[in-house]
Structures are given as C-alpha cells and as structure tokens.
Image (tube, rainbow, N blue to C red):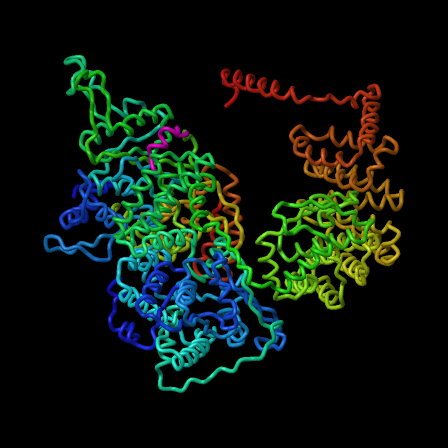
Amino acid sequence: MEKYIKPPVEIRYERELTALKATDTARRPENWQLSPKSVRTFILGSPKPLTYNGETIHITKKFFGNDALVERCIITLAGNRGLMLVGEPGTAKTMLSELLSAAISGISTNTIQGTAGTTEDMIKYSWNYALLLAKGPVKEALVPSPLYVGMSQGKITRFEEITRTPAEIQDSLISVMSDKVLNIPELEENGLLFAKPGFNIIGTANTRDKGVNEMSSALKRRFNFETVTPVRDVSLEKEIIIKEVEQIALENHIDMPVDTDVAELLAATYHELREGISESGIKIDKPAAVMSTAEAVSVYYQTLANAWYYEEDVQNLSNLTQNICNAVCKDSREDLEKLKGYFHTVVKEKSEKVGGIWKKFYETKKYLR
Amino acid sequence: MEKILRDKEIFKIIPFDETKPVLYFPIRHHSPVCSYHLRKTIESYQPDCILVEGPQNANHLIPVLTDEETILPIAFYYFYKDMEKAVSEEAAHYKCYYPFLETSPEYQALREAKKRGIQAKFIDLPYGEILAHTAQNTGLRIKRNVQSYNDDYYLSENDIRKQLCEKTGMRHFDEFWENFFEIDGLAVSTEEFVARMMSYCYLSRNSTPTEQMEADGCLVREQYMAVQIKKALKEYQRVLVVTGGFHTPGLYEYVNGSEKLEEIKLHLWDENTQNVYAIPYSLEAADALNGYASGMQNPGFYEAVWQKLEKSHGGNRKETEAYKETVLDMLLRCGKAAGKERLLVTMADIASAAAMYEGLAMLRDKKAPGLYELYDSVTSCFVKGEKNAVSDQPVKILSKLATGDKVGTLCHAAGKSPLIEDFERHCEQYKLKIQSVIEKKLELDIYAKPRHMEISRFFHRINFLGTQFAIKIKGFDIVENTDRSRVRELWKYKRSVQTDAALIDATVYGATVEEACKVILANRLQEVTRCRDAAKLYVESFLMGLDDSMKFARRMEEIIFQDGDFFSLGKGIYYFRTMMSLKRLYRIKLECDIRFLKLSFQKLLLLLPSMIHVDEEQSKECIKIFKMLYSMAAEGNVSEVLEGECEQLIDSFTEMIQAKDPEASVYGAILGMLYGEETSYKSEIQNALRGYLTGSETVRQQGAAFLRGLFYTARDMVLVGDEFIRMTDTLLASLPADGFMEVLPELRLAFSYFLPAEIDKVAEKVSLLYGKQAGTFTKVFQIYEETYPTGIALEKEICADMEKEGKLS
C-alpha cells in the first residue's frame, strides 16, 4: 500500500471489502458493490471471520454507538431519498459517510466540500476554458463535479458540511434529487444527464458550529435525516479512544503503547463535562466548547506524540491537562473557569476517593491557565 | 438463537402432550402471540378445567371480568392491611394491581372457559399471604408508586437477556421478544411455539439464583399452586394450567416430584384486612405499570395486532400479515395525527417510511416489520432536521399511538368499594350532581355558611386522594398566598374514570374518605424531612378540616427539631402563623399550631446569626423572612405567645450588625428594622451608607444592595428630611457608567418597594436637589400600544443603516 497521511476508507479496509464482496451472496441494489447486509457487516463488524483466498479476515466494528442508525442509513441509500447526517461536531458523521460510500460504491472520495464560498458550478459542473474556447461547449470541455460523476457512474456523492454552503446554492440539489436528472443547457440536445442506479447523496451537517445556514424545507423533504449523537457510554468511549489513538500512532510511526488508565481518565473527563454531571452526581457547568470523542482522541494523540518526541512519560499528566485546557478553552474564557470548577469539585473528589491516576490528575491543576 | 430455543432436551423435560391429564401452557403477560396459541391449545386440548395464575381471593371477580358488559382494560386492585404484622413490624398497608387487556392470555383463558362452560379459577396465594412470604425490598415488597402483581421481571430482566440481545443483534429485550416470539411465533405451530417458550423460560430460570426465588416468594407460591393443581387433578380429567412461563418448570417439578407437598396454611383475615376490587383501567396506565417489568409495553400497538389476528382467525391468511397490516395502519394514523399537529409530513414521507420498515425488516431477517422498524422509519422519514425535543414530535405521536388511549368500563355486577360508597353518600348529602358528564360549577360562601365550609373540606379531601374530582377556580390559596381578600370559593367538579380509580386505589387506607385522608396524611408526614413540607401538609390537613392529633404533632415536632434549613423553617413559620390567624374564621379547633410556631421560631433564632453572611442569591428570600419575623413580633396575637422570642429576635439583630463583612442587603434590611425600633439607628445607617460611598468600586456597587435591603424594611427613612436623598445621590454619581449599569437592576428593585405616592415625594426631593421645579421628574410619559410597532420599525431601519455603514457587526 502506498503511504498516505490518512488513506481513504476503501484503501484502509481494502482486504475486508474484497473479502466481503467475494463472499456476498445476498440481494444487492443495482450498481451496489455489496448487498445491504454486507454493508452493515462492514460497518458494524462481525464476530465470524471470513475466509478469502485461504486467508482469515476479521471484519472489525468501525462505527460505535447506534447500530439501528446505521441500518436506517443503508436502507435510506437504497431508496430514492438522500441521507443527511446531522449532529454535533466530532460525532463521526464524516467517517460514517465515508464508510457507507466505500462499501456501497467502492469509493469514498467522490466528495463536494461545502464552504461559504461553494458555488453552483462546484456542485454541478464547470468548464475547461481553454477547451471551451477552442472547441466550444462540448462534453470534452466540461469539467464534471463529484455530483456529475456520481450521477453518470451510479455512485454515492458525498456532500460534506452542506449547511456551510449558502441556502440558495444548496437548493440547486433539489431538482437533481427529485428528477434524478441534471440539465446542461450548453450541450443542447445532449444536455441531459440521467442518474444511473446506485447514485445517491450523503450530506453531513454540523448543528453546533457557528456560520451554518438553514436548509430550505424543499431540500429537507428530499432527505432522510439521521442525528448522530455522541457516545454516551464511558467504557465504549474509552475503547474508541484507545483504538483510534493506536491507529493514528501506527500511521505516524509512534511506537508507544496507549495507556488504558489515561484513556479511561480522559473518557470519563470528556463524558462528565459533556453531560454536565459527574459519576457521583455532582452538577458541573458544561463548557460551550464541543466535547466530542474525536476531540478526546486528538487530545490523547497530542499527549502521546509529545511523550514520544520529548521522551516523556505519558503517565505524567501535565501535558494531558494542558492539551485538555487548549481543546476546551478555544472560544471563551468562561470555559476555562468551568474547567477549573470541574477540577476543584469532581477531580478533587476523585483524587480523594479513588486516588491513583486521579490524584496525579488533580495535581496538574496549576496548568489550567 | 432459533437453535437454542428449539433445544429438544429442554422441551423433553416438560412435555407438551395433549394426551396427558395436565397440560402446562407458559405465557408472558399481555402477549398476543401467547393468547393466540393458548386459544388454539384450548380448542385442541378441550380441557374441563383451566387454572390461571392469579391470587385466589379474586375468584369471585372472574364473572365480572368475563361479563359481556365489561370492556377491557380493567384491573383487579388488591389491598392488604398488615395490622397483625404478618409481613413486618412496620404494620404497613399494601396494594397492587393485576391488569387485564384484550391481549392478556389469562383473560383469553377465562373467557374461553366461560364460553365452554367449564371450571376456571385462580390458583395463587392470596395477596396478603404472598406478602407474608416475601422478604423486604424483593418481589411485591419493592417500594414503588404503583405495584403490579405480574412478575414479568423474571423473563425480561434476567442475566441471559443481555447475552441474547448481543448475539441476535437486537437493541433490547423488547425487540428480541417481538422478533423471536411475537412475529416468528405466529409462523410456527403451537407445539413449536411452546417449545421455544419452555426453552427460554428454562434458561431464564437457570440464570435466576434460588435465593432470589426464595426471597421474593416465588417458590412458596409455586408450591401453593402445585397443591391446587393436584387438587384439581382429583376432580377433573383434563386440566390446563396457564401461568407465567417462568413458573412452568417449577410447577412441573412440584407436581411430579416424589416429595409430598405441604399445604400452606392461610390466615383468617376479614375483608377489611384483605380484599380485592375490579376497577376500570386504561392502556396508558397499563403501559406505565409495564414500565416496572410487569408485562409487554406498548399495549395499544399489540392490541391492534391482536384485533387483526382475531379477524383472520380461521381464515387462510398468513398470521404474520397481522403485523404488516398493523404497522401500516399505525404509520398512516401517525402521519394523519402529525398533519393535525401541523407537522410537515407528506404522502411521500409516508411512502418512504413504508419502504424503510420493509427494507429494515429484510435487512434484519425478520418475517415482518414490527414496532421497532416502525419507530425507525418514523424517526428517519418524519423527523426533519436534527432530532431534538421539538423535531421529535412525530416519534412522540407514534409513542402515544403505540401506548393507546382506550379506557375500560365495568359491568353493573362489579360492586363498589366502601370508599366509593362513602364518596357517593357525601355527594348525595351535599347534593352534588355526579351523574352528569358535564362539568358543574359551585360557589361556596365558606365563611358565612357552615354547610359550604363542609363541602369545601369534602372537595379538599377528595382531591387529596388524587381523584382530580374538583378544581378550585377562585378563592384564597393559603399555600401560594394569593386571593386573600376573596371570601367565596368557586369550584368546578366532575366525576370521571380517574375519580373512581383513585378512590379504589385509596381503599387500602380506609373505608371512609376521612379515614383514608388521615392515613395518607400521616404516611406523607413520615416521608418528609423539611419543616416547609411538613407545614404544607399541615395546611392541607387544615383545609380538609382534620384535627391535629397527638401522633401528627409528635412527628411535626421531630421534623422541626431536625430541620437545619433557615428557609424551610421560615416558610413553615409563615404557614403556622397563617393557620393560627385563620382558625377562627375556618371554625376549626387546632391544638398544636401555637406550639409548632413557637418551636420553629426558636429553631430559626438559632440559625439567624449565620444569615448575615448569606449568599447574594439567597439574600432576597432571607430579608423577606426577616421582615416577616419582625412584623410578627408587632402582631398582637403572635407577640402574646412569642413574647420572649420577639425580644430575642431584636437582640439577635443587634448582634448581627456587629458582624464583619455582612451581606449588604441583609445588613441594610436589619438596620432598617432596628431603625423602626429605635430612631437612633439613623446615624448608624448614614455611617454605613457613607462607608459604601467612600469605598472601592466593588464596595460602592454593594451600596445598591444595601439600599435595596434598607428600603425593603424602612422606606420611610427616605421620606424624612433630605439628607438621605443627598447621600444616595452622591453614591449614584460616584459610580462609573459601567458600574452604574451593573447596579441598575438592584436599584430598580430597591425603588420598587415604594408606593406611587412615595415615588412622587422622592421625585420632588430630587427635583429640589437639582434646583428644578417640583414635578419635573414626576411626569410620566405614557407609551401607547400603537407606538411599539413604530418603534420596532424605526429600530430595524437604524440597524440596517448602521450595518450598511459597517458600524454594526
């Protein structure tokens, strides 16, 4: 495998996808690489390993928290409505959309990145102006957008951060989603692109970020919405942190084991700050910042990298506290006070009752600044 | 999973052999599939006696349950008063429900027995006996708001449940049950279904420790039921035993075991100690009760499935079609109800949802879509945008539909509980029109007419039992201290199903309304720990016209002694004082009100000094209590009984102002009250205000809080001379703009204590201070309603202009 900082899903899980495809006997919608059942197995994992080319391949669980949601997503994509994944930042919406695209269409990179500057051209098609001037409006001069590619090849098109795009630009999707046809008036009689079976759109949208636009009701009607919520189970969150940090560390050649106690502490801290209540029932002021599992992973990875490059002990929690502080106190000074409040109540209580790593954690409170 | 459930070995242990004299049919409460196969079994087995799990002392109610006039849901309400202390030393009262729905296999068994003219009876121990064999905090002795006889927890809360869900990929036990029993069970033969049930129940039993079964009375109940089965076998040829599946292996073992079964001796309790009544019930109540693991939830949905099964009974249609049809029906009803709520649900959404539940059923290898596929499809296709409390409406509508809103009615032969009889007797005595379904209004001149006072008390008593029979629309509310000047009370009342249900529910506490109220009141008093809550109960007792017996008084004293919460005691004092002043008007003889008042006052005095450092947030409530105490000391009737305490109050106030760093508003309020006692405190007040004036910015800001406290208790200070106005003016002028804005809310509050005429006087003084004519600041510019839209439009225009010029971000 060629080296990438972050390989796309279809490359990262190439072996699993190939084995699933080869052993898949269930019914599949036209142009789907895998049947809905195999798509589910790919995303939610299976206790039974597959045997392919004499090799035993384990299908790992890749999305945690809500299996029914994944099933609903798959059935939505097999129908004629788009799928819109909404939720707080860091809840693995993008990852889920990548997994679904890779399993269904074999490609997760056919993506439109929504920004405030996204135009209708970027969504539909644009022109190679040199060719346009030389040959006029011919198909050869047309630069296809990911939507165009998806329609013409019967593949999933991902639309990331759709609500960052102005509402009127978002609305250019309405007719495509209703009629499954894209009109290119410049190509005259050849100007109708009919979507092939297998085409659909997966949109993702954050609900808590600043600078998002409202979606029109007309567009909303063409999507099924799925709200992805943060993982509510501390032990599951700990598992995710460990698994993800190990993977990133491996990709970045950091040969250092992930400390499970630290991961547990981090998972508990993030969980309590997110829920606004401690394990023992103490009420905490919730920070305004997003307390997602993805943020927790990032905090731990930074701590691990720091320990690796500066040859420190990962159990020395001062770096962890500083990284938590940097992650939490981004937008508002008040969040720092809330974090301090958490330390002075919950962490203090745990340092006295539980001791051990919580005692060490409490001792790092001086780094909260 | 199917493999486990078809385990032949387990099935062999308890044979389902219709040639035998006894046939055990395992059920889960409220399960349509169990009812379906049970009915088939009755058809093929042709029993001459059916024995059903249920307390034996309800046998006389079987004709009521199966009467054609009776419409389900109804419930059996059992009560037992442990006066003999057979259960525990607490000598408590116990009650529980045994609901019957159309889907209940027990009901179907009894109905079929009636149809066939064969014997049918309950075989479990009477309710009180079960309690006597149950350890504390287990089984029917777990403390809950409502208790159910059904012991579904054996099947739904055991250890293997989690493993089964994990293995089968189901979210929870309810989904697992629906898929493998309710839906799949319709597609298999009765023998196969019973085999699966037996296997699951056997597994559940194996994962339940014997100690638990002993503690919650399960084993002794089974032993008793086994004796009844043996007795029936002597009398009948073909006995069908219908019990919760968990008990089937136990019963089988007892009946077929070699050991001789000992007869369990029953107590000889009269009907006042232990009794049972039939009451109308609702699907909603059954659903809430099922939340405590007493049967399948979502009874509305499963009743709809049962109705489809009834329709297809004997036809050629596949039984699993019942699910497909019910799911579609529910979806359409949900879409229609959402439309009525003005939620945006289109026909396309409904079609998409139908495709979704079909697709999910296929993906999940289910024979037909069930309730959970329906929930999924509504979540996915009807909820637009992020799922939250607002956008979640369609799911809530579906949940309501799945619960159902059916309310049962009883046949005429059902009989009445003594409490209902007492209620009806009183209604007749007071000429209340309870036969009407229309709400009636009644105005009561309670102070002038003793009969009206009696009716008011009756309304309060009936309401105290949770009947929602009468609502007071107008009249003095002692608890909230509103409408004090009103001498008449206006009530509306209507007898409803809830009224009867609540009255039956309270039967355990007494045979008359008065007796039940007294017992409940005493019980609640045992539960509360704060003086505030206890005094509130005292108010309720007062309104109900009940006396404050010695038992009541002892508990109240205990609570006052133990309560260390200043605010709770303060509220308690308010209630006691109010009742003391009202008792003559209400023509009620109270023995202990003065004692309670004195005790709580004394307790409060102990806590008083620490309140000088109260939190800013609690300061408002604190000074309110101070003022109340102070004004009580000035009231003739109170100061007479609290002479010593009133003197002590002033002494405490004097001591409190010596404290360091007092909370500003509390300090101001105390000085204001002391000024009322002795005008020499004026200089002290001026000194204090000067201190706030000359302090740092933070201290100056506290000056506003000081004024708020002071004005609350002694606003007349401002009106005497102009010295105070001048000092206040200096204080305000010394504050920077930002600081002024910060204290503005406090100041507004401080001045809000003045009466309009006093405000005019203050304005006059301020005018003179600034060399203006009197009346300059008293002009009020009235703003009319029509002015507001103009103002809003103007503001918008200004904002738009500022935005254009980049002055507004």
User: Does the magenta run of residues contain A220?
Assistant: yes
Residue bounds of the magenta highlight: A214-224
Question: In front here: A140 or B36?
Answer: B36
Question: In front here: A206 or B537?
Answer: B537
Q: Is residue B344 above or below residue B584?
A: above
Residue B788 visible in the snapshot: yes
Count numbered badges in the picture.
0
Q: Is residue B2 above or below residue B393?
A: below
Position of residue B477 in the picture relative to residue B225 (left or right): right
User: For the point 14% across and 14% down, which residue is it?
Assistant: A135
User: For the point 69% across and 22% down, which residue is it?
Assistant: B783
Find residue B434 and report its horizontal and vertical position in percent: 65, 52
Residue most toward the left?
A53
Question: In front here: A136 or B737?
Answer: A136
Question: In front here: B23 or B1?
Answer: B23
Find residue B11 and report its horizontal and vertical position in percent: 28, 72
Q: Is residue B623 above or below residue B32?
A: above
State which quadrant residue A107 falls in: top left
User: Does the magenta run of residues contain B508?
Assistant: no
Find residue B717 and report its horizontal and vertical position in percent: 85, 37
Position of residue A24 in the picture relative to residue B553 (left or right): left
**Quadrant where the N terminus of chain A is found in the figure:** top left
Residue B157 visible in the snapshot: no
Find residue B648 and report its horizontal and vertical position in percent: 84, 56
